[in-house]
């Protein structure tokens, strides 16, 4: 009972959430430092309780008994935006350069079954700019996390099947400003015309900037929130001595719309160069049908000898189905206006390659690469949501403190990617340095 209370307490801690940056689109380049140290490859070997985010069937590869993993991840994005014309800013760096995310997992191997519970951050994105065209801060912070109940079944010595039921939460903060005519141009459903008329100048003649703002300013929550469900299926198969194949399918999420309270958002219009006072209209934001995509992956792990293992995965993230538009409805003054910020993301292919070398009985060294294409087209990349990083180079190590406990660490570097939105006249630059640290106890 005491162990269960500890697990529930950790789950409650994880539910506070931490908005984080992610790097395969909005996905992490790897989950858990064992896999991340090997470029994120994780489909076909034991990578700890991070299997619940990768391939739950690999839980069947662990030894007998129970395992508890407690981890902390750090993501260090380096983002800057150069506004080439029309925004009044030459170059500005994002202050969102340090994001921390706790995670934990507990699993028990009981005969042919392995089961447990885990809390992990799925991914997200965000920026922090201290000034903009109306001389106020702009920011975005999206976080998505999961409480996961995994189950793996050892069908035979060669075949293991696995799956999980995932409870998901999402949260979002946005402070975004643009020319009032540009915001009016995003309207797809004008409601009864009161708000739409205001944005097209009928109520705010002489105003030239419109700001949409909903943010609680916390690193551990978001103003707009939603919950939902998803799941995963996976398998591993020992095809030959030292050769294991793996595959996983992650279902598209079923998240509800993210919503603020009835006055949790603001529409703010400004006259940048004239005498008109700034006007604020409080209201409610609803972010429509934001989902995480279905994903499928295939992998292989080959033990060349007792000390050397190679792993390779291919992963497909179907962003196109879920990231066509970023759609928000703003309700105020007895009216509701729906905006659609075009995204038009492409599906993303990711290749993950890694090697692990057991240098001593206690020390394991790892290295890997994570090679991906950029899913965001030039004409829809936005400086508030620049999830454009492509390739990653990773290192890692594991050290056994005893037969029952150990530490694992990974370090990732993602070289700078530059992308220009010529339609709106700005360029985004983005690189990352990330790490993960995990303590493991077996009993």
Image (cartoon, rainbow, N blue to C red):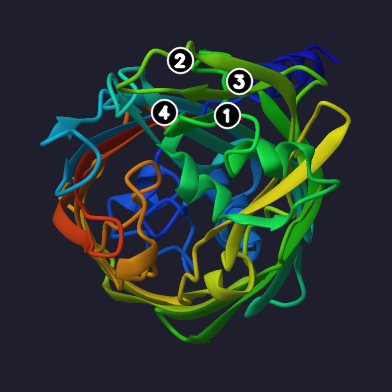
* Horizontal side of residue 50 vs 228, given as left or right: left
Q: Residue at x 78, y 61 (%)?
A: 112
Residue 204: which disc? 1
Q: Which quarter of the rendering shows the N terminus?
A: top right
Q: Does the CB distance between marks 4 and 1 fall below 8 Å? A: no
Q: Residue at x 30, y 18 (%)?
A: 135
- Provide residue 279's location: percent of width, then percent of height: 57, 16
- Provide residue 65's location: percent of width, then percent of height: 66, 41
* Mark 4 element type: strand
| Residue where numbered disc 4 is placed | 139
| Residue where numbered disc 3 is placed | 221
Q: Is residue 367 above or below residue 32?
A: below
- Provide residue 253's location: percent of width, then percent of height: 73, 58
Label 1 neighbourhood size at 10 Å, few (<14), some (14-19), many (20+)? some
* Mark 3 element type: loop
Q: Does the CB distance between marks 1 and 2 fall below 8 Å? A: yes
């Amino acid at each position: 009972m005491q162990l269960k209370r500890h697990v529930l307490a950790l789950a409650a801690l994880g539910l506070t959430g931490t908005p984080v940056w992610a790097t395969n689109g909005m996905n992490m380049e790897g989950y858990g430092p064992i896999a991340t140290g090997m470029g994120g490859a994780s489909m076909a070997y034991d990578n700890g309780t991070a299997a619940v985010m990768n391939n739950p069937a690999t839980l069947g590869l662990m030894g007998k008994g129970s395992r508890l993993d407690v981890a902390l991840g750090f993501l260090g994005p380096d983002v800057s935006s150069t506004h080439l014309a029309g925004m009044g800013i030459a170059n500005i760096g994002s202050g969102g350069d340090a994001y921390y995310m706790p995670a934990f997992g507990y699993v028990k191997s009981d005969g042919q079954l392995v089961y447990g519970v885990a809390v992990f951050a799925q991914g997200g994105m965000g920026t922090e700019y201290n000034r903009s065209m109306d001389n106020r801060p702009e920011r975005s912070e999206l976080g998505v996390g999961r409480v996961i109940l995994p189950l793996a079944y050892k069908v035979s010595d060669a075949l293991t099947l696995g799956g999980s039921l995932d409870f998901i939460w999402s949260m979002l903060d946005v402070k975004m400003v643009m020319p009032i005519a540009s915001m009016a141009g995003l309207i797809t459903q004008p409601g009864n015309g009161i708000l739409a008329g205001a944005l097209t100048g009928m109520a705010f003649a002489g105003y030239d900037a419109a700001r949409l703002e909903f943010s609680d300013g916390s690193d551990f929550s978001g103003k707009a929130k939603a919950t939902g469900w998803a799941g995963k299926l996976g398998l591993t198969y020992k095809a030959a001595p030292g050769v294991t194949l793996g595959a996983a399918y992650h279902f598209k999420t079923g998240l509800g719309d993210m919503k603020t309270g009835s006055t949790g958002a603001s529409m703010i219009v400004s006259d940048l160069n004239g005498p008109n006072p700034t006007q604020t209209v409080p209201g409610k934001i609803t972010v429509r049908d934001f989902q995480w995509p279905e994903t499928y992956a295939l992998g292989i792990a080959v033990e060349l000898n007792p000390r050397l293992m190679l792993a390779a995965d291919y992963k497909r993230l179907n962003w196109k189905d879920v990231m066509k538009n970023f759609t928000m409805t703003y309700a105020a003054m007895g009216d509701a206006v729906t905006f659609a910020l075009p995204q038009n993301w492409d599906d993303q292919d990711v290749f993950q390659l890694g090697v692990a070398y057991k240098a001593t009985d206690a020390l394991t060294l790892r290295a890997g690469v994570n090679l991906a294409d950029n899913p965001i087209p030039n004409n829809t990349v936005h400086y508030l949501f620049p999830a454009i990083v492509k390739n990653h180079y990773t290192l890692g190590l594991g050290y056994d403190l005893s037969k029952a406990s150990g530490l694992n660490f990974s370090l990732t570097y993602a070289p700078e990617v530059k992308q220009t939105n010529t339609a709106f006249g700005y360029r985004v630059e983005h690189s990352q340095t990330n790490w993960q640290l995990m303590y493991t106890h077996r009993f």
